[in-house]
Image: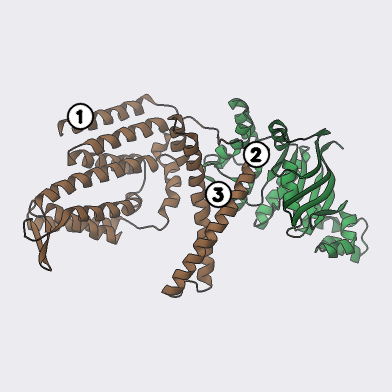
Amino acid sequence: MIITAILTMLVIWCLFYGAVPGVALVCLCLVMGGFLAVVGRHKHEGFLVIDIIAQRSQLNKINSPLKFWTVLILLFLCIASRSVVVGLVLMAVMLFLTVAVGGLELHDYLSLLSLPVSFVLISALALLVDYGSSPFGVINLPVSQGYLVVSQAAQLRTALVLSKALGALSCLYLLSLSTPMPEIISVLRKAHVPDIVIELMYLIYRYTFVLFEMYRSMKDAAKSRLGFVNFSTSVKTTGKIYTNLLARSYQKSMNNFDAMESRCYIGEIRFLENKKELSRLHAIVAASLVVIISGLTITLH
Amino acid sequence: MEEILRFEGINFSYEEDRVALKNISVSLYKAQKVAVLGNNGAGKSTFFLCCNGVVKPQKGRMFLRDKEIGATRKESVYLRQTVGIVFQDPDSQIIAGTVEAEISFGPMNLKLPEAVVRSQVEDAIEKMRLESMRTRAPHYLSGGEKKRVSIADVLAMNPQLLLFDEPGASLDPENTLLLERNLEMLSEKGLGLVIATHDVDFAWRWADRVLVFHAGELVADADPEAVFSDEELLRRCGLVQPTLFQVGKLYNINPLPRAISDLKGR
């Protein structure tokens, strides 16, 4: 989380330098960075609990296809927009829905977001900074015989890309933190996504957890025998663990196929699905959100 | 006793030099409790896969309710519906994202109407007491809970004969006790139960009949007392006598105690 906070401060500094007065900019950087460092709480293996969060979310009661299609439309609007406002509004709305309505703790939300946001911020830095022979930007840092330059055009371009990326991420997080994965897969099946893709999704989803558990136990066993005592041993141990994991996963896949065959598997995976009623209120709220964001996308084009 | 499955001279090998089952002839009956013993690699798991039709014997004949089973899809489905296997590792068996969906996998493959699938799933959930975890993802369940889900998986297909491959492996004492209660309940409902195990004490107190496999051969098929009295057989197959059996022999208790409660008052 500290890395995300530092990256955030750096990106805000580069993004608003020249547009916001110096003192205000320092305050903004410190407030944002400090907020992320203090409120955000980094958790290892956070992805393993996504399903539990989704199950517990108050938004889990909402009809899954309604959620899925609404999020998908909002995602497209966010990507199609030519204004930073749309992405920022979506970020705020999704944060409100996931945390205030869904009931997820703010620090958990930030912790889950921290990893993809860090990648987005690193990409933003790459977009912001150019290398030139003359100091043509708002920030010019002499390096070797040239300059690291942040130009106004790069600031505008990055702000738009950043707002789109963060808006889209927030949309996807609303969906994944309020809808268990099997329900999302079920919606995709109804949307006529090919069966082979659906079945692979089911198996990949399930076996991510099984293989991770296997990996964790192998790693603990290696640790208990000083397998990670220094760098070179760690590299060798990691290689051996991955080799073993590959062999075990192959064995597991064969056992799994036998188990499926023993229950009359004939080439297609089907499960019983429970339908969640579509409430009129939810449909109205979703439609209103889509109309508002569409309006913003069109008017701010 | 009503016969469900019969093997006549079954042979199976994974590779030419690796014979897994040699000339197996055996019958399995409804409402019978059978323990299958044998050291690792003796052929117990292959025998189970053969019983369910996942592995096709290369030689010999199989009869399901006195009707010979061939290799057609219809016959395979009938066999797999009648004879269910609960695998040793639930993680090799469970594939769905929720407990309820997982249990519905078998009945859905049988192409039953949705209402029937729901009723069979409900029935299996109730039998295995999984009501509170029906919407939970299997990867968040404990080992004992996963084992109950894997049993419910097979129960939902309404089998007549249930095969368990080392069901007590990696279970804590509390869950082992719970498993034994569930086995008792299933037996009372008239299901034939066949359990592969290394636990001779369990086989002694639970089984009506014991099958012993050694190097792919069925070397004994008798009641528990006859099997555990044959010291030469036990030595050859790497087995030992159950504790209560030894206690009974040591103190000349007749009949031999099957459970601790049988020693009451002595």
Which residue is denoted by mark 1 in the rendering?
A295
The one nearer the camera, A19 or B72, is B72
Which label was assigned to residue A76? none
Badge nearest the viewer, 3 or 2:
2
Which residue is denoted by mark 2 in the rendering?
A263
Left/right of residue B157 with respect to residue A113 in the rendered view: right
Which residue is denoted by mark 3 in the rendering?
B141
Is label 3 on the same chain as label 1? no
Residue density around tag 3, few if under 14, some if 14–19, many if 20 or more, within 10 Å: some
Q: Mark 3 and mark 1: span between their CA atoms? A: 46 Å
Which lettered chain is shown in brown? A
Q: Which amino acid lies under the numbered mark 1 shown in the image of this protein?
A: Gly
Q: Position of residue A204 (x, y in %)?
A: 49, 46
Residue at 56% of width from left, 44% of height from top?
Answer: B95
Q: Which amino acid lies under the numbered mark 3 shown in the image of this protein?
A: Leu
**Which quadrant of the view contains residue B65?**
top right
Q: Mark 3 and mark 2: span between their CA atoms? A: 22 Å
Residue at 66% of width from left, 51% of height from top?
Answer: B88
The answer to whether mark 3 and mark 2 are in CB contact below 8 A is no
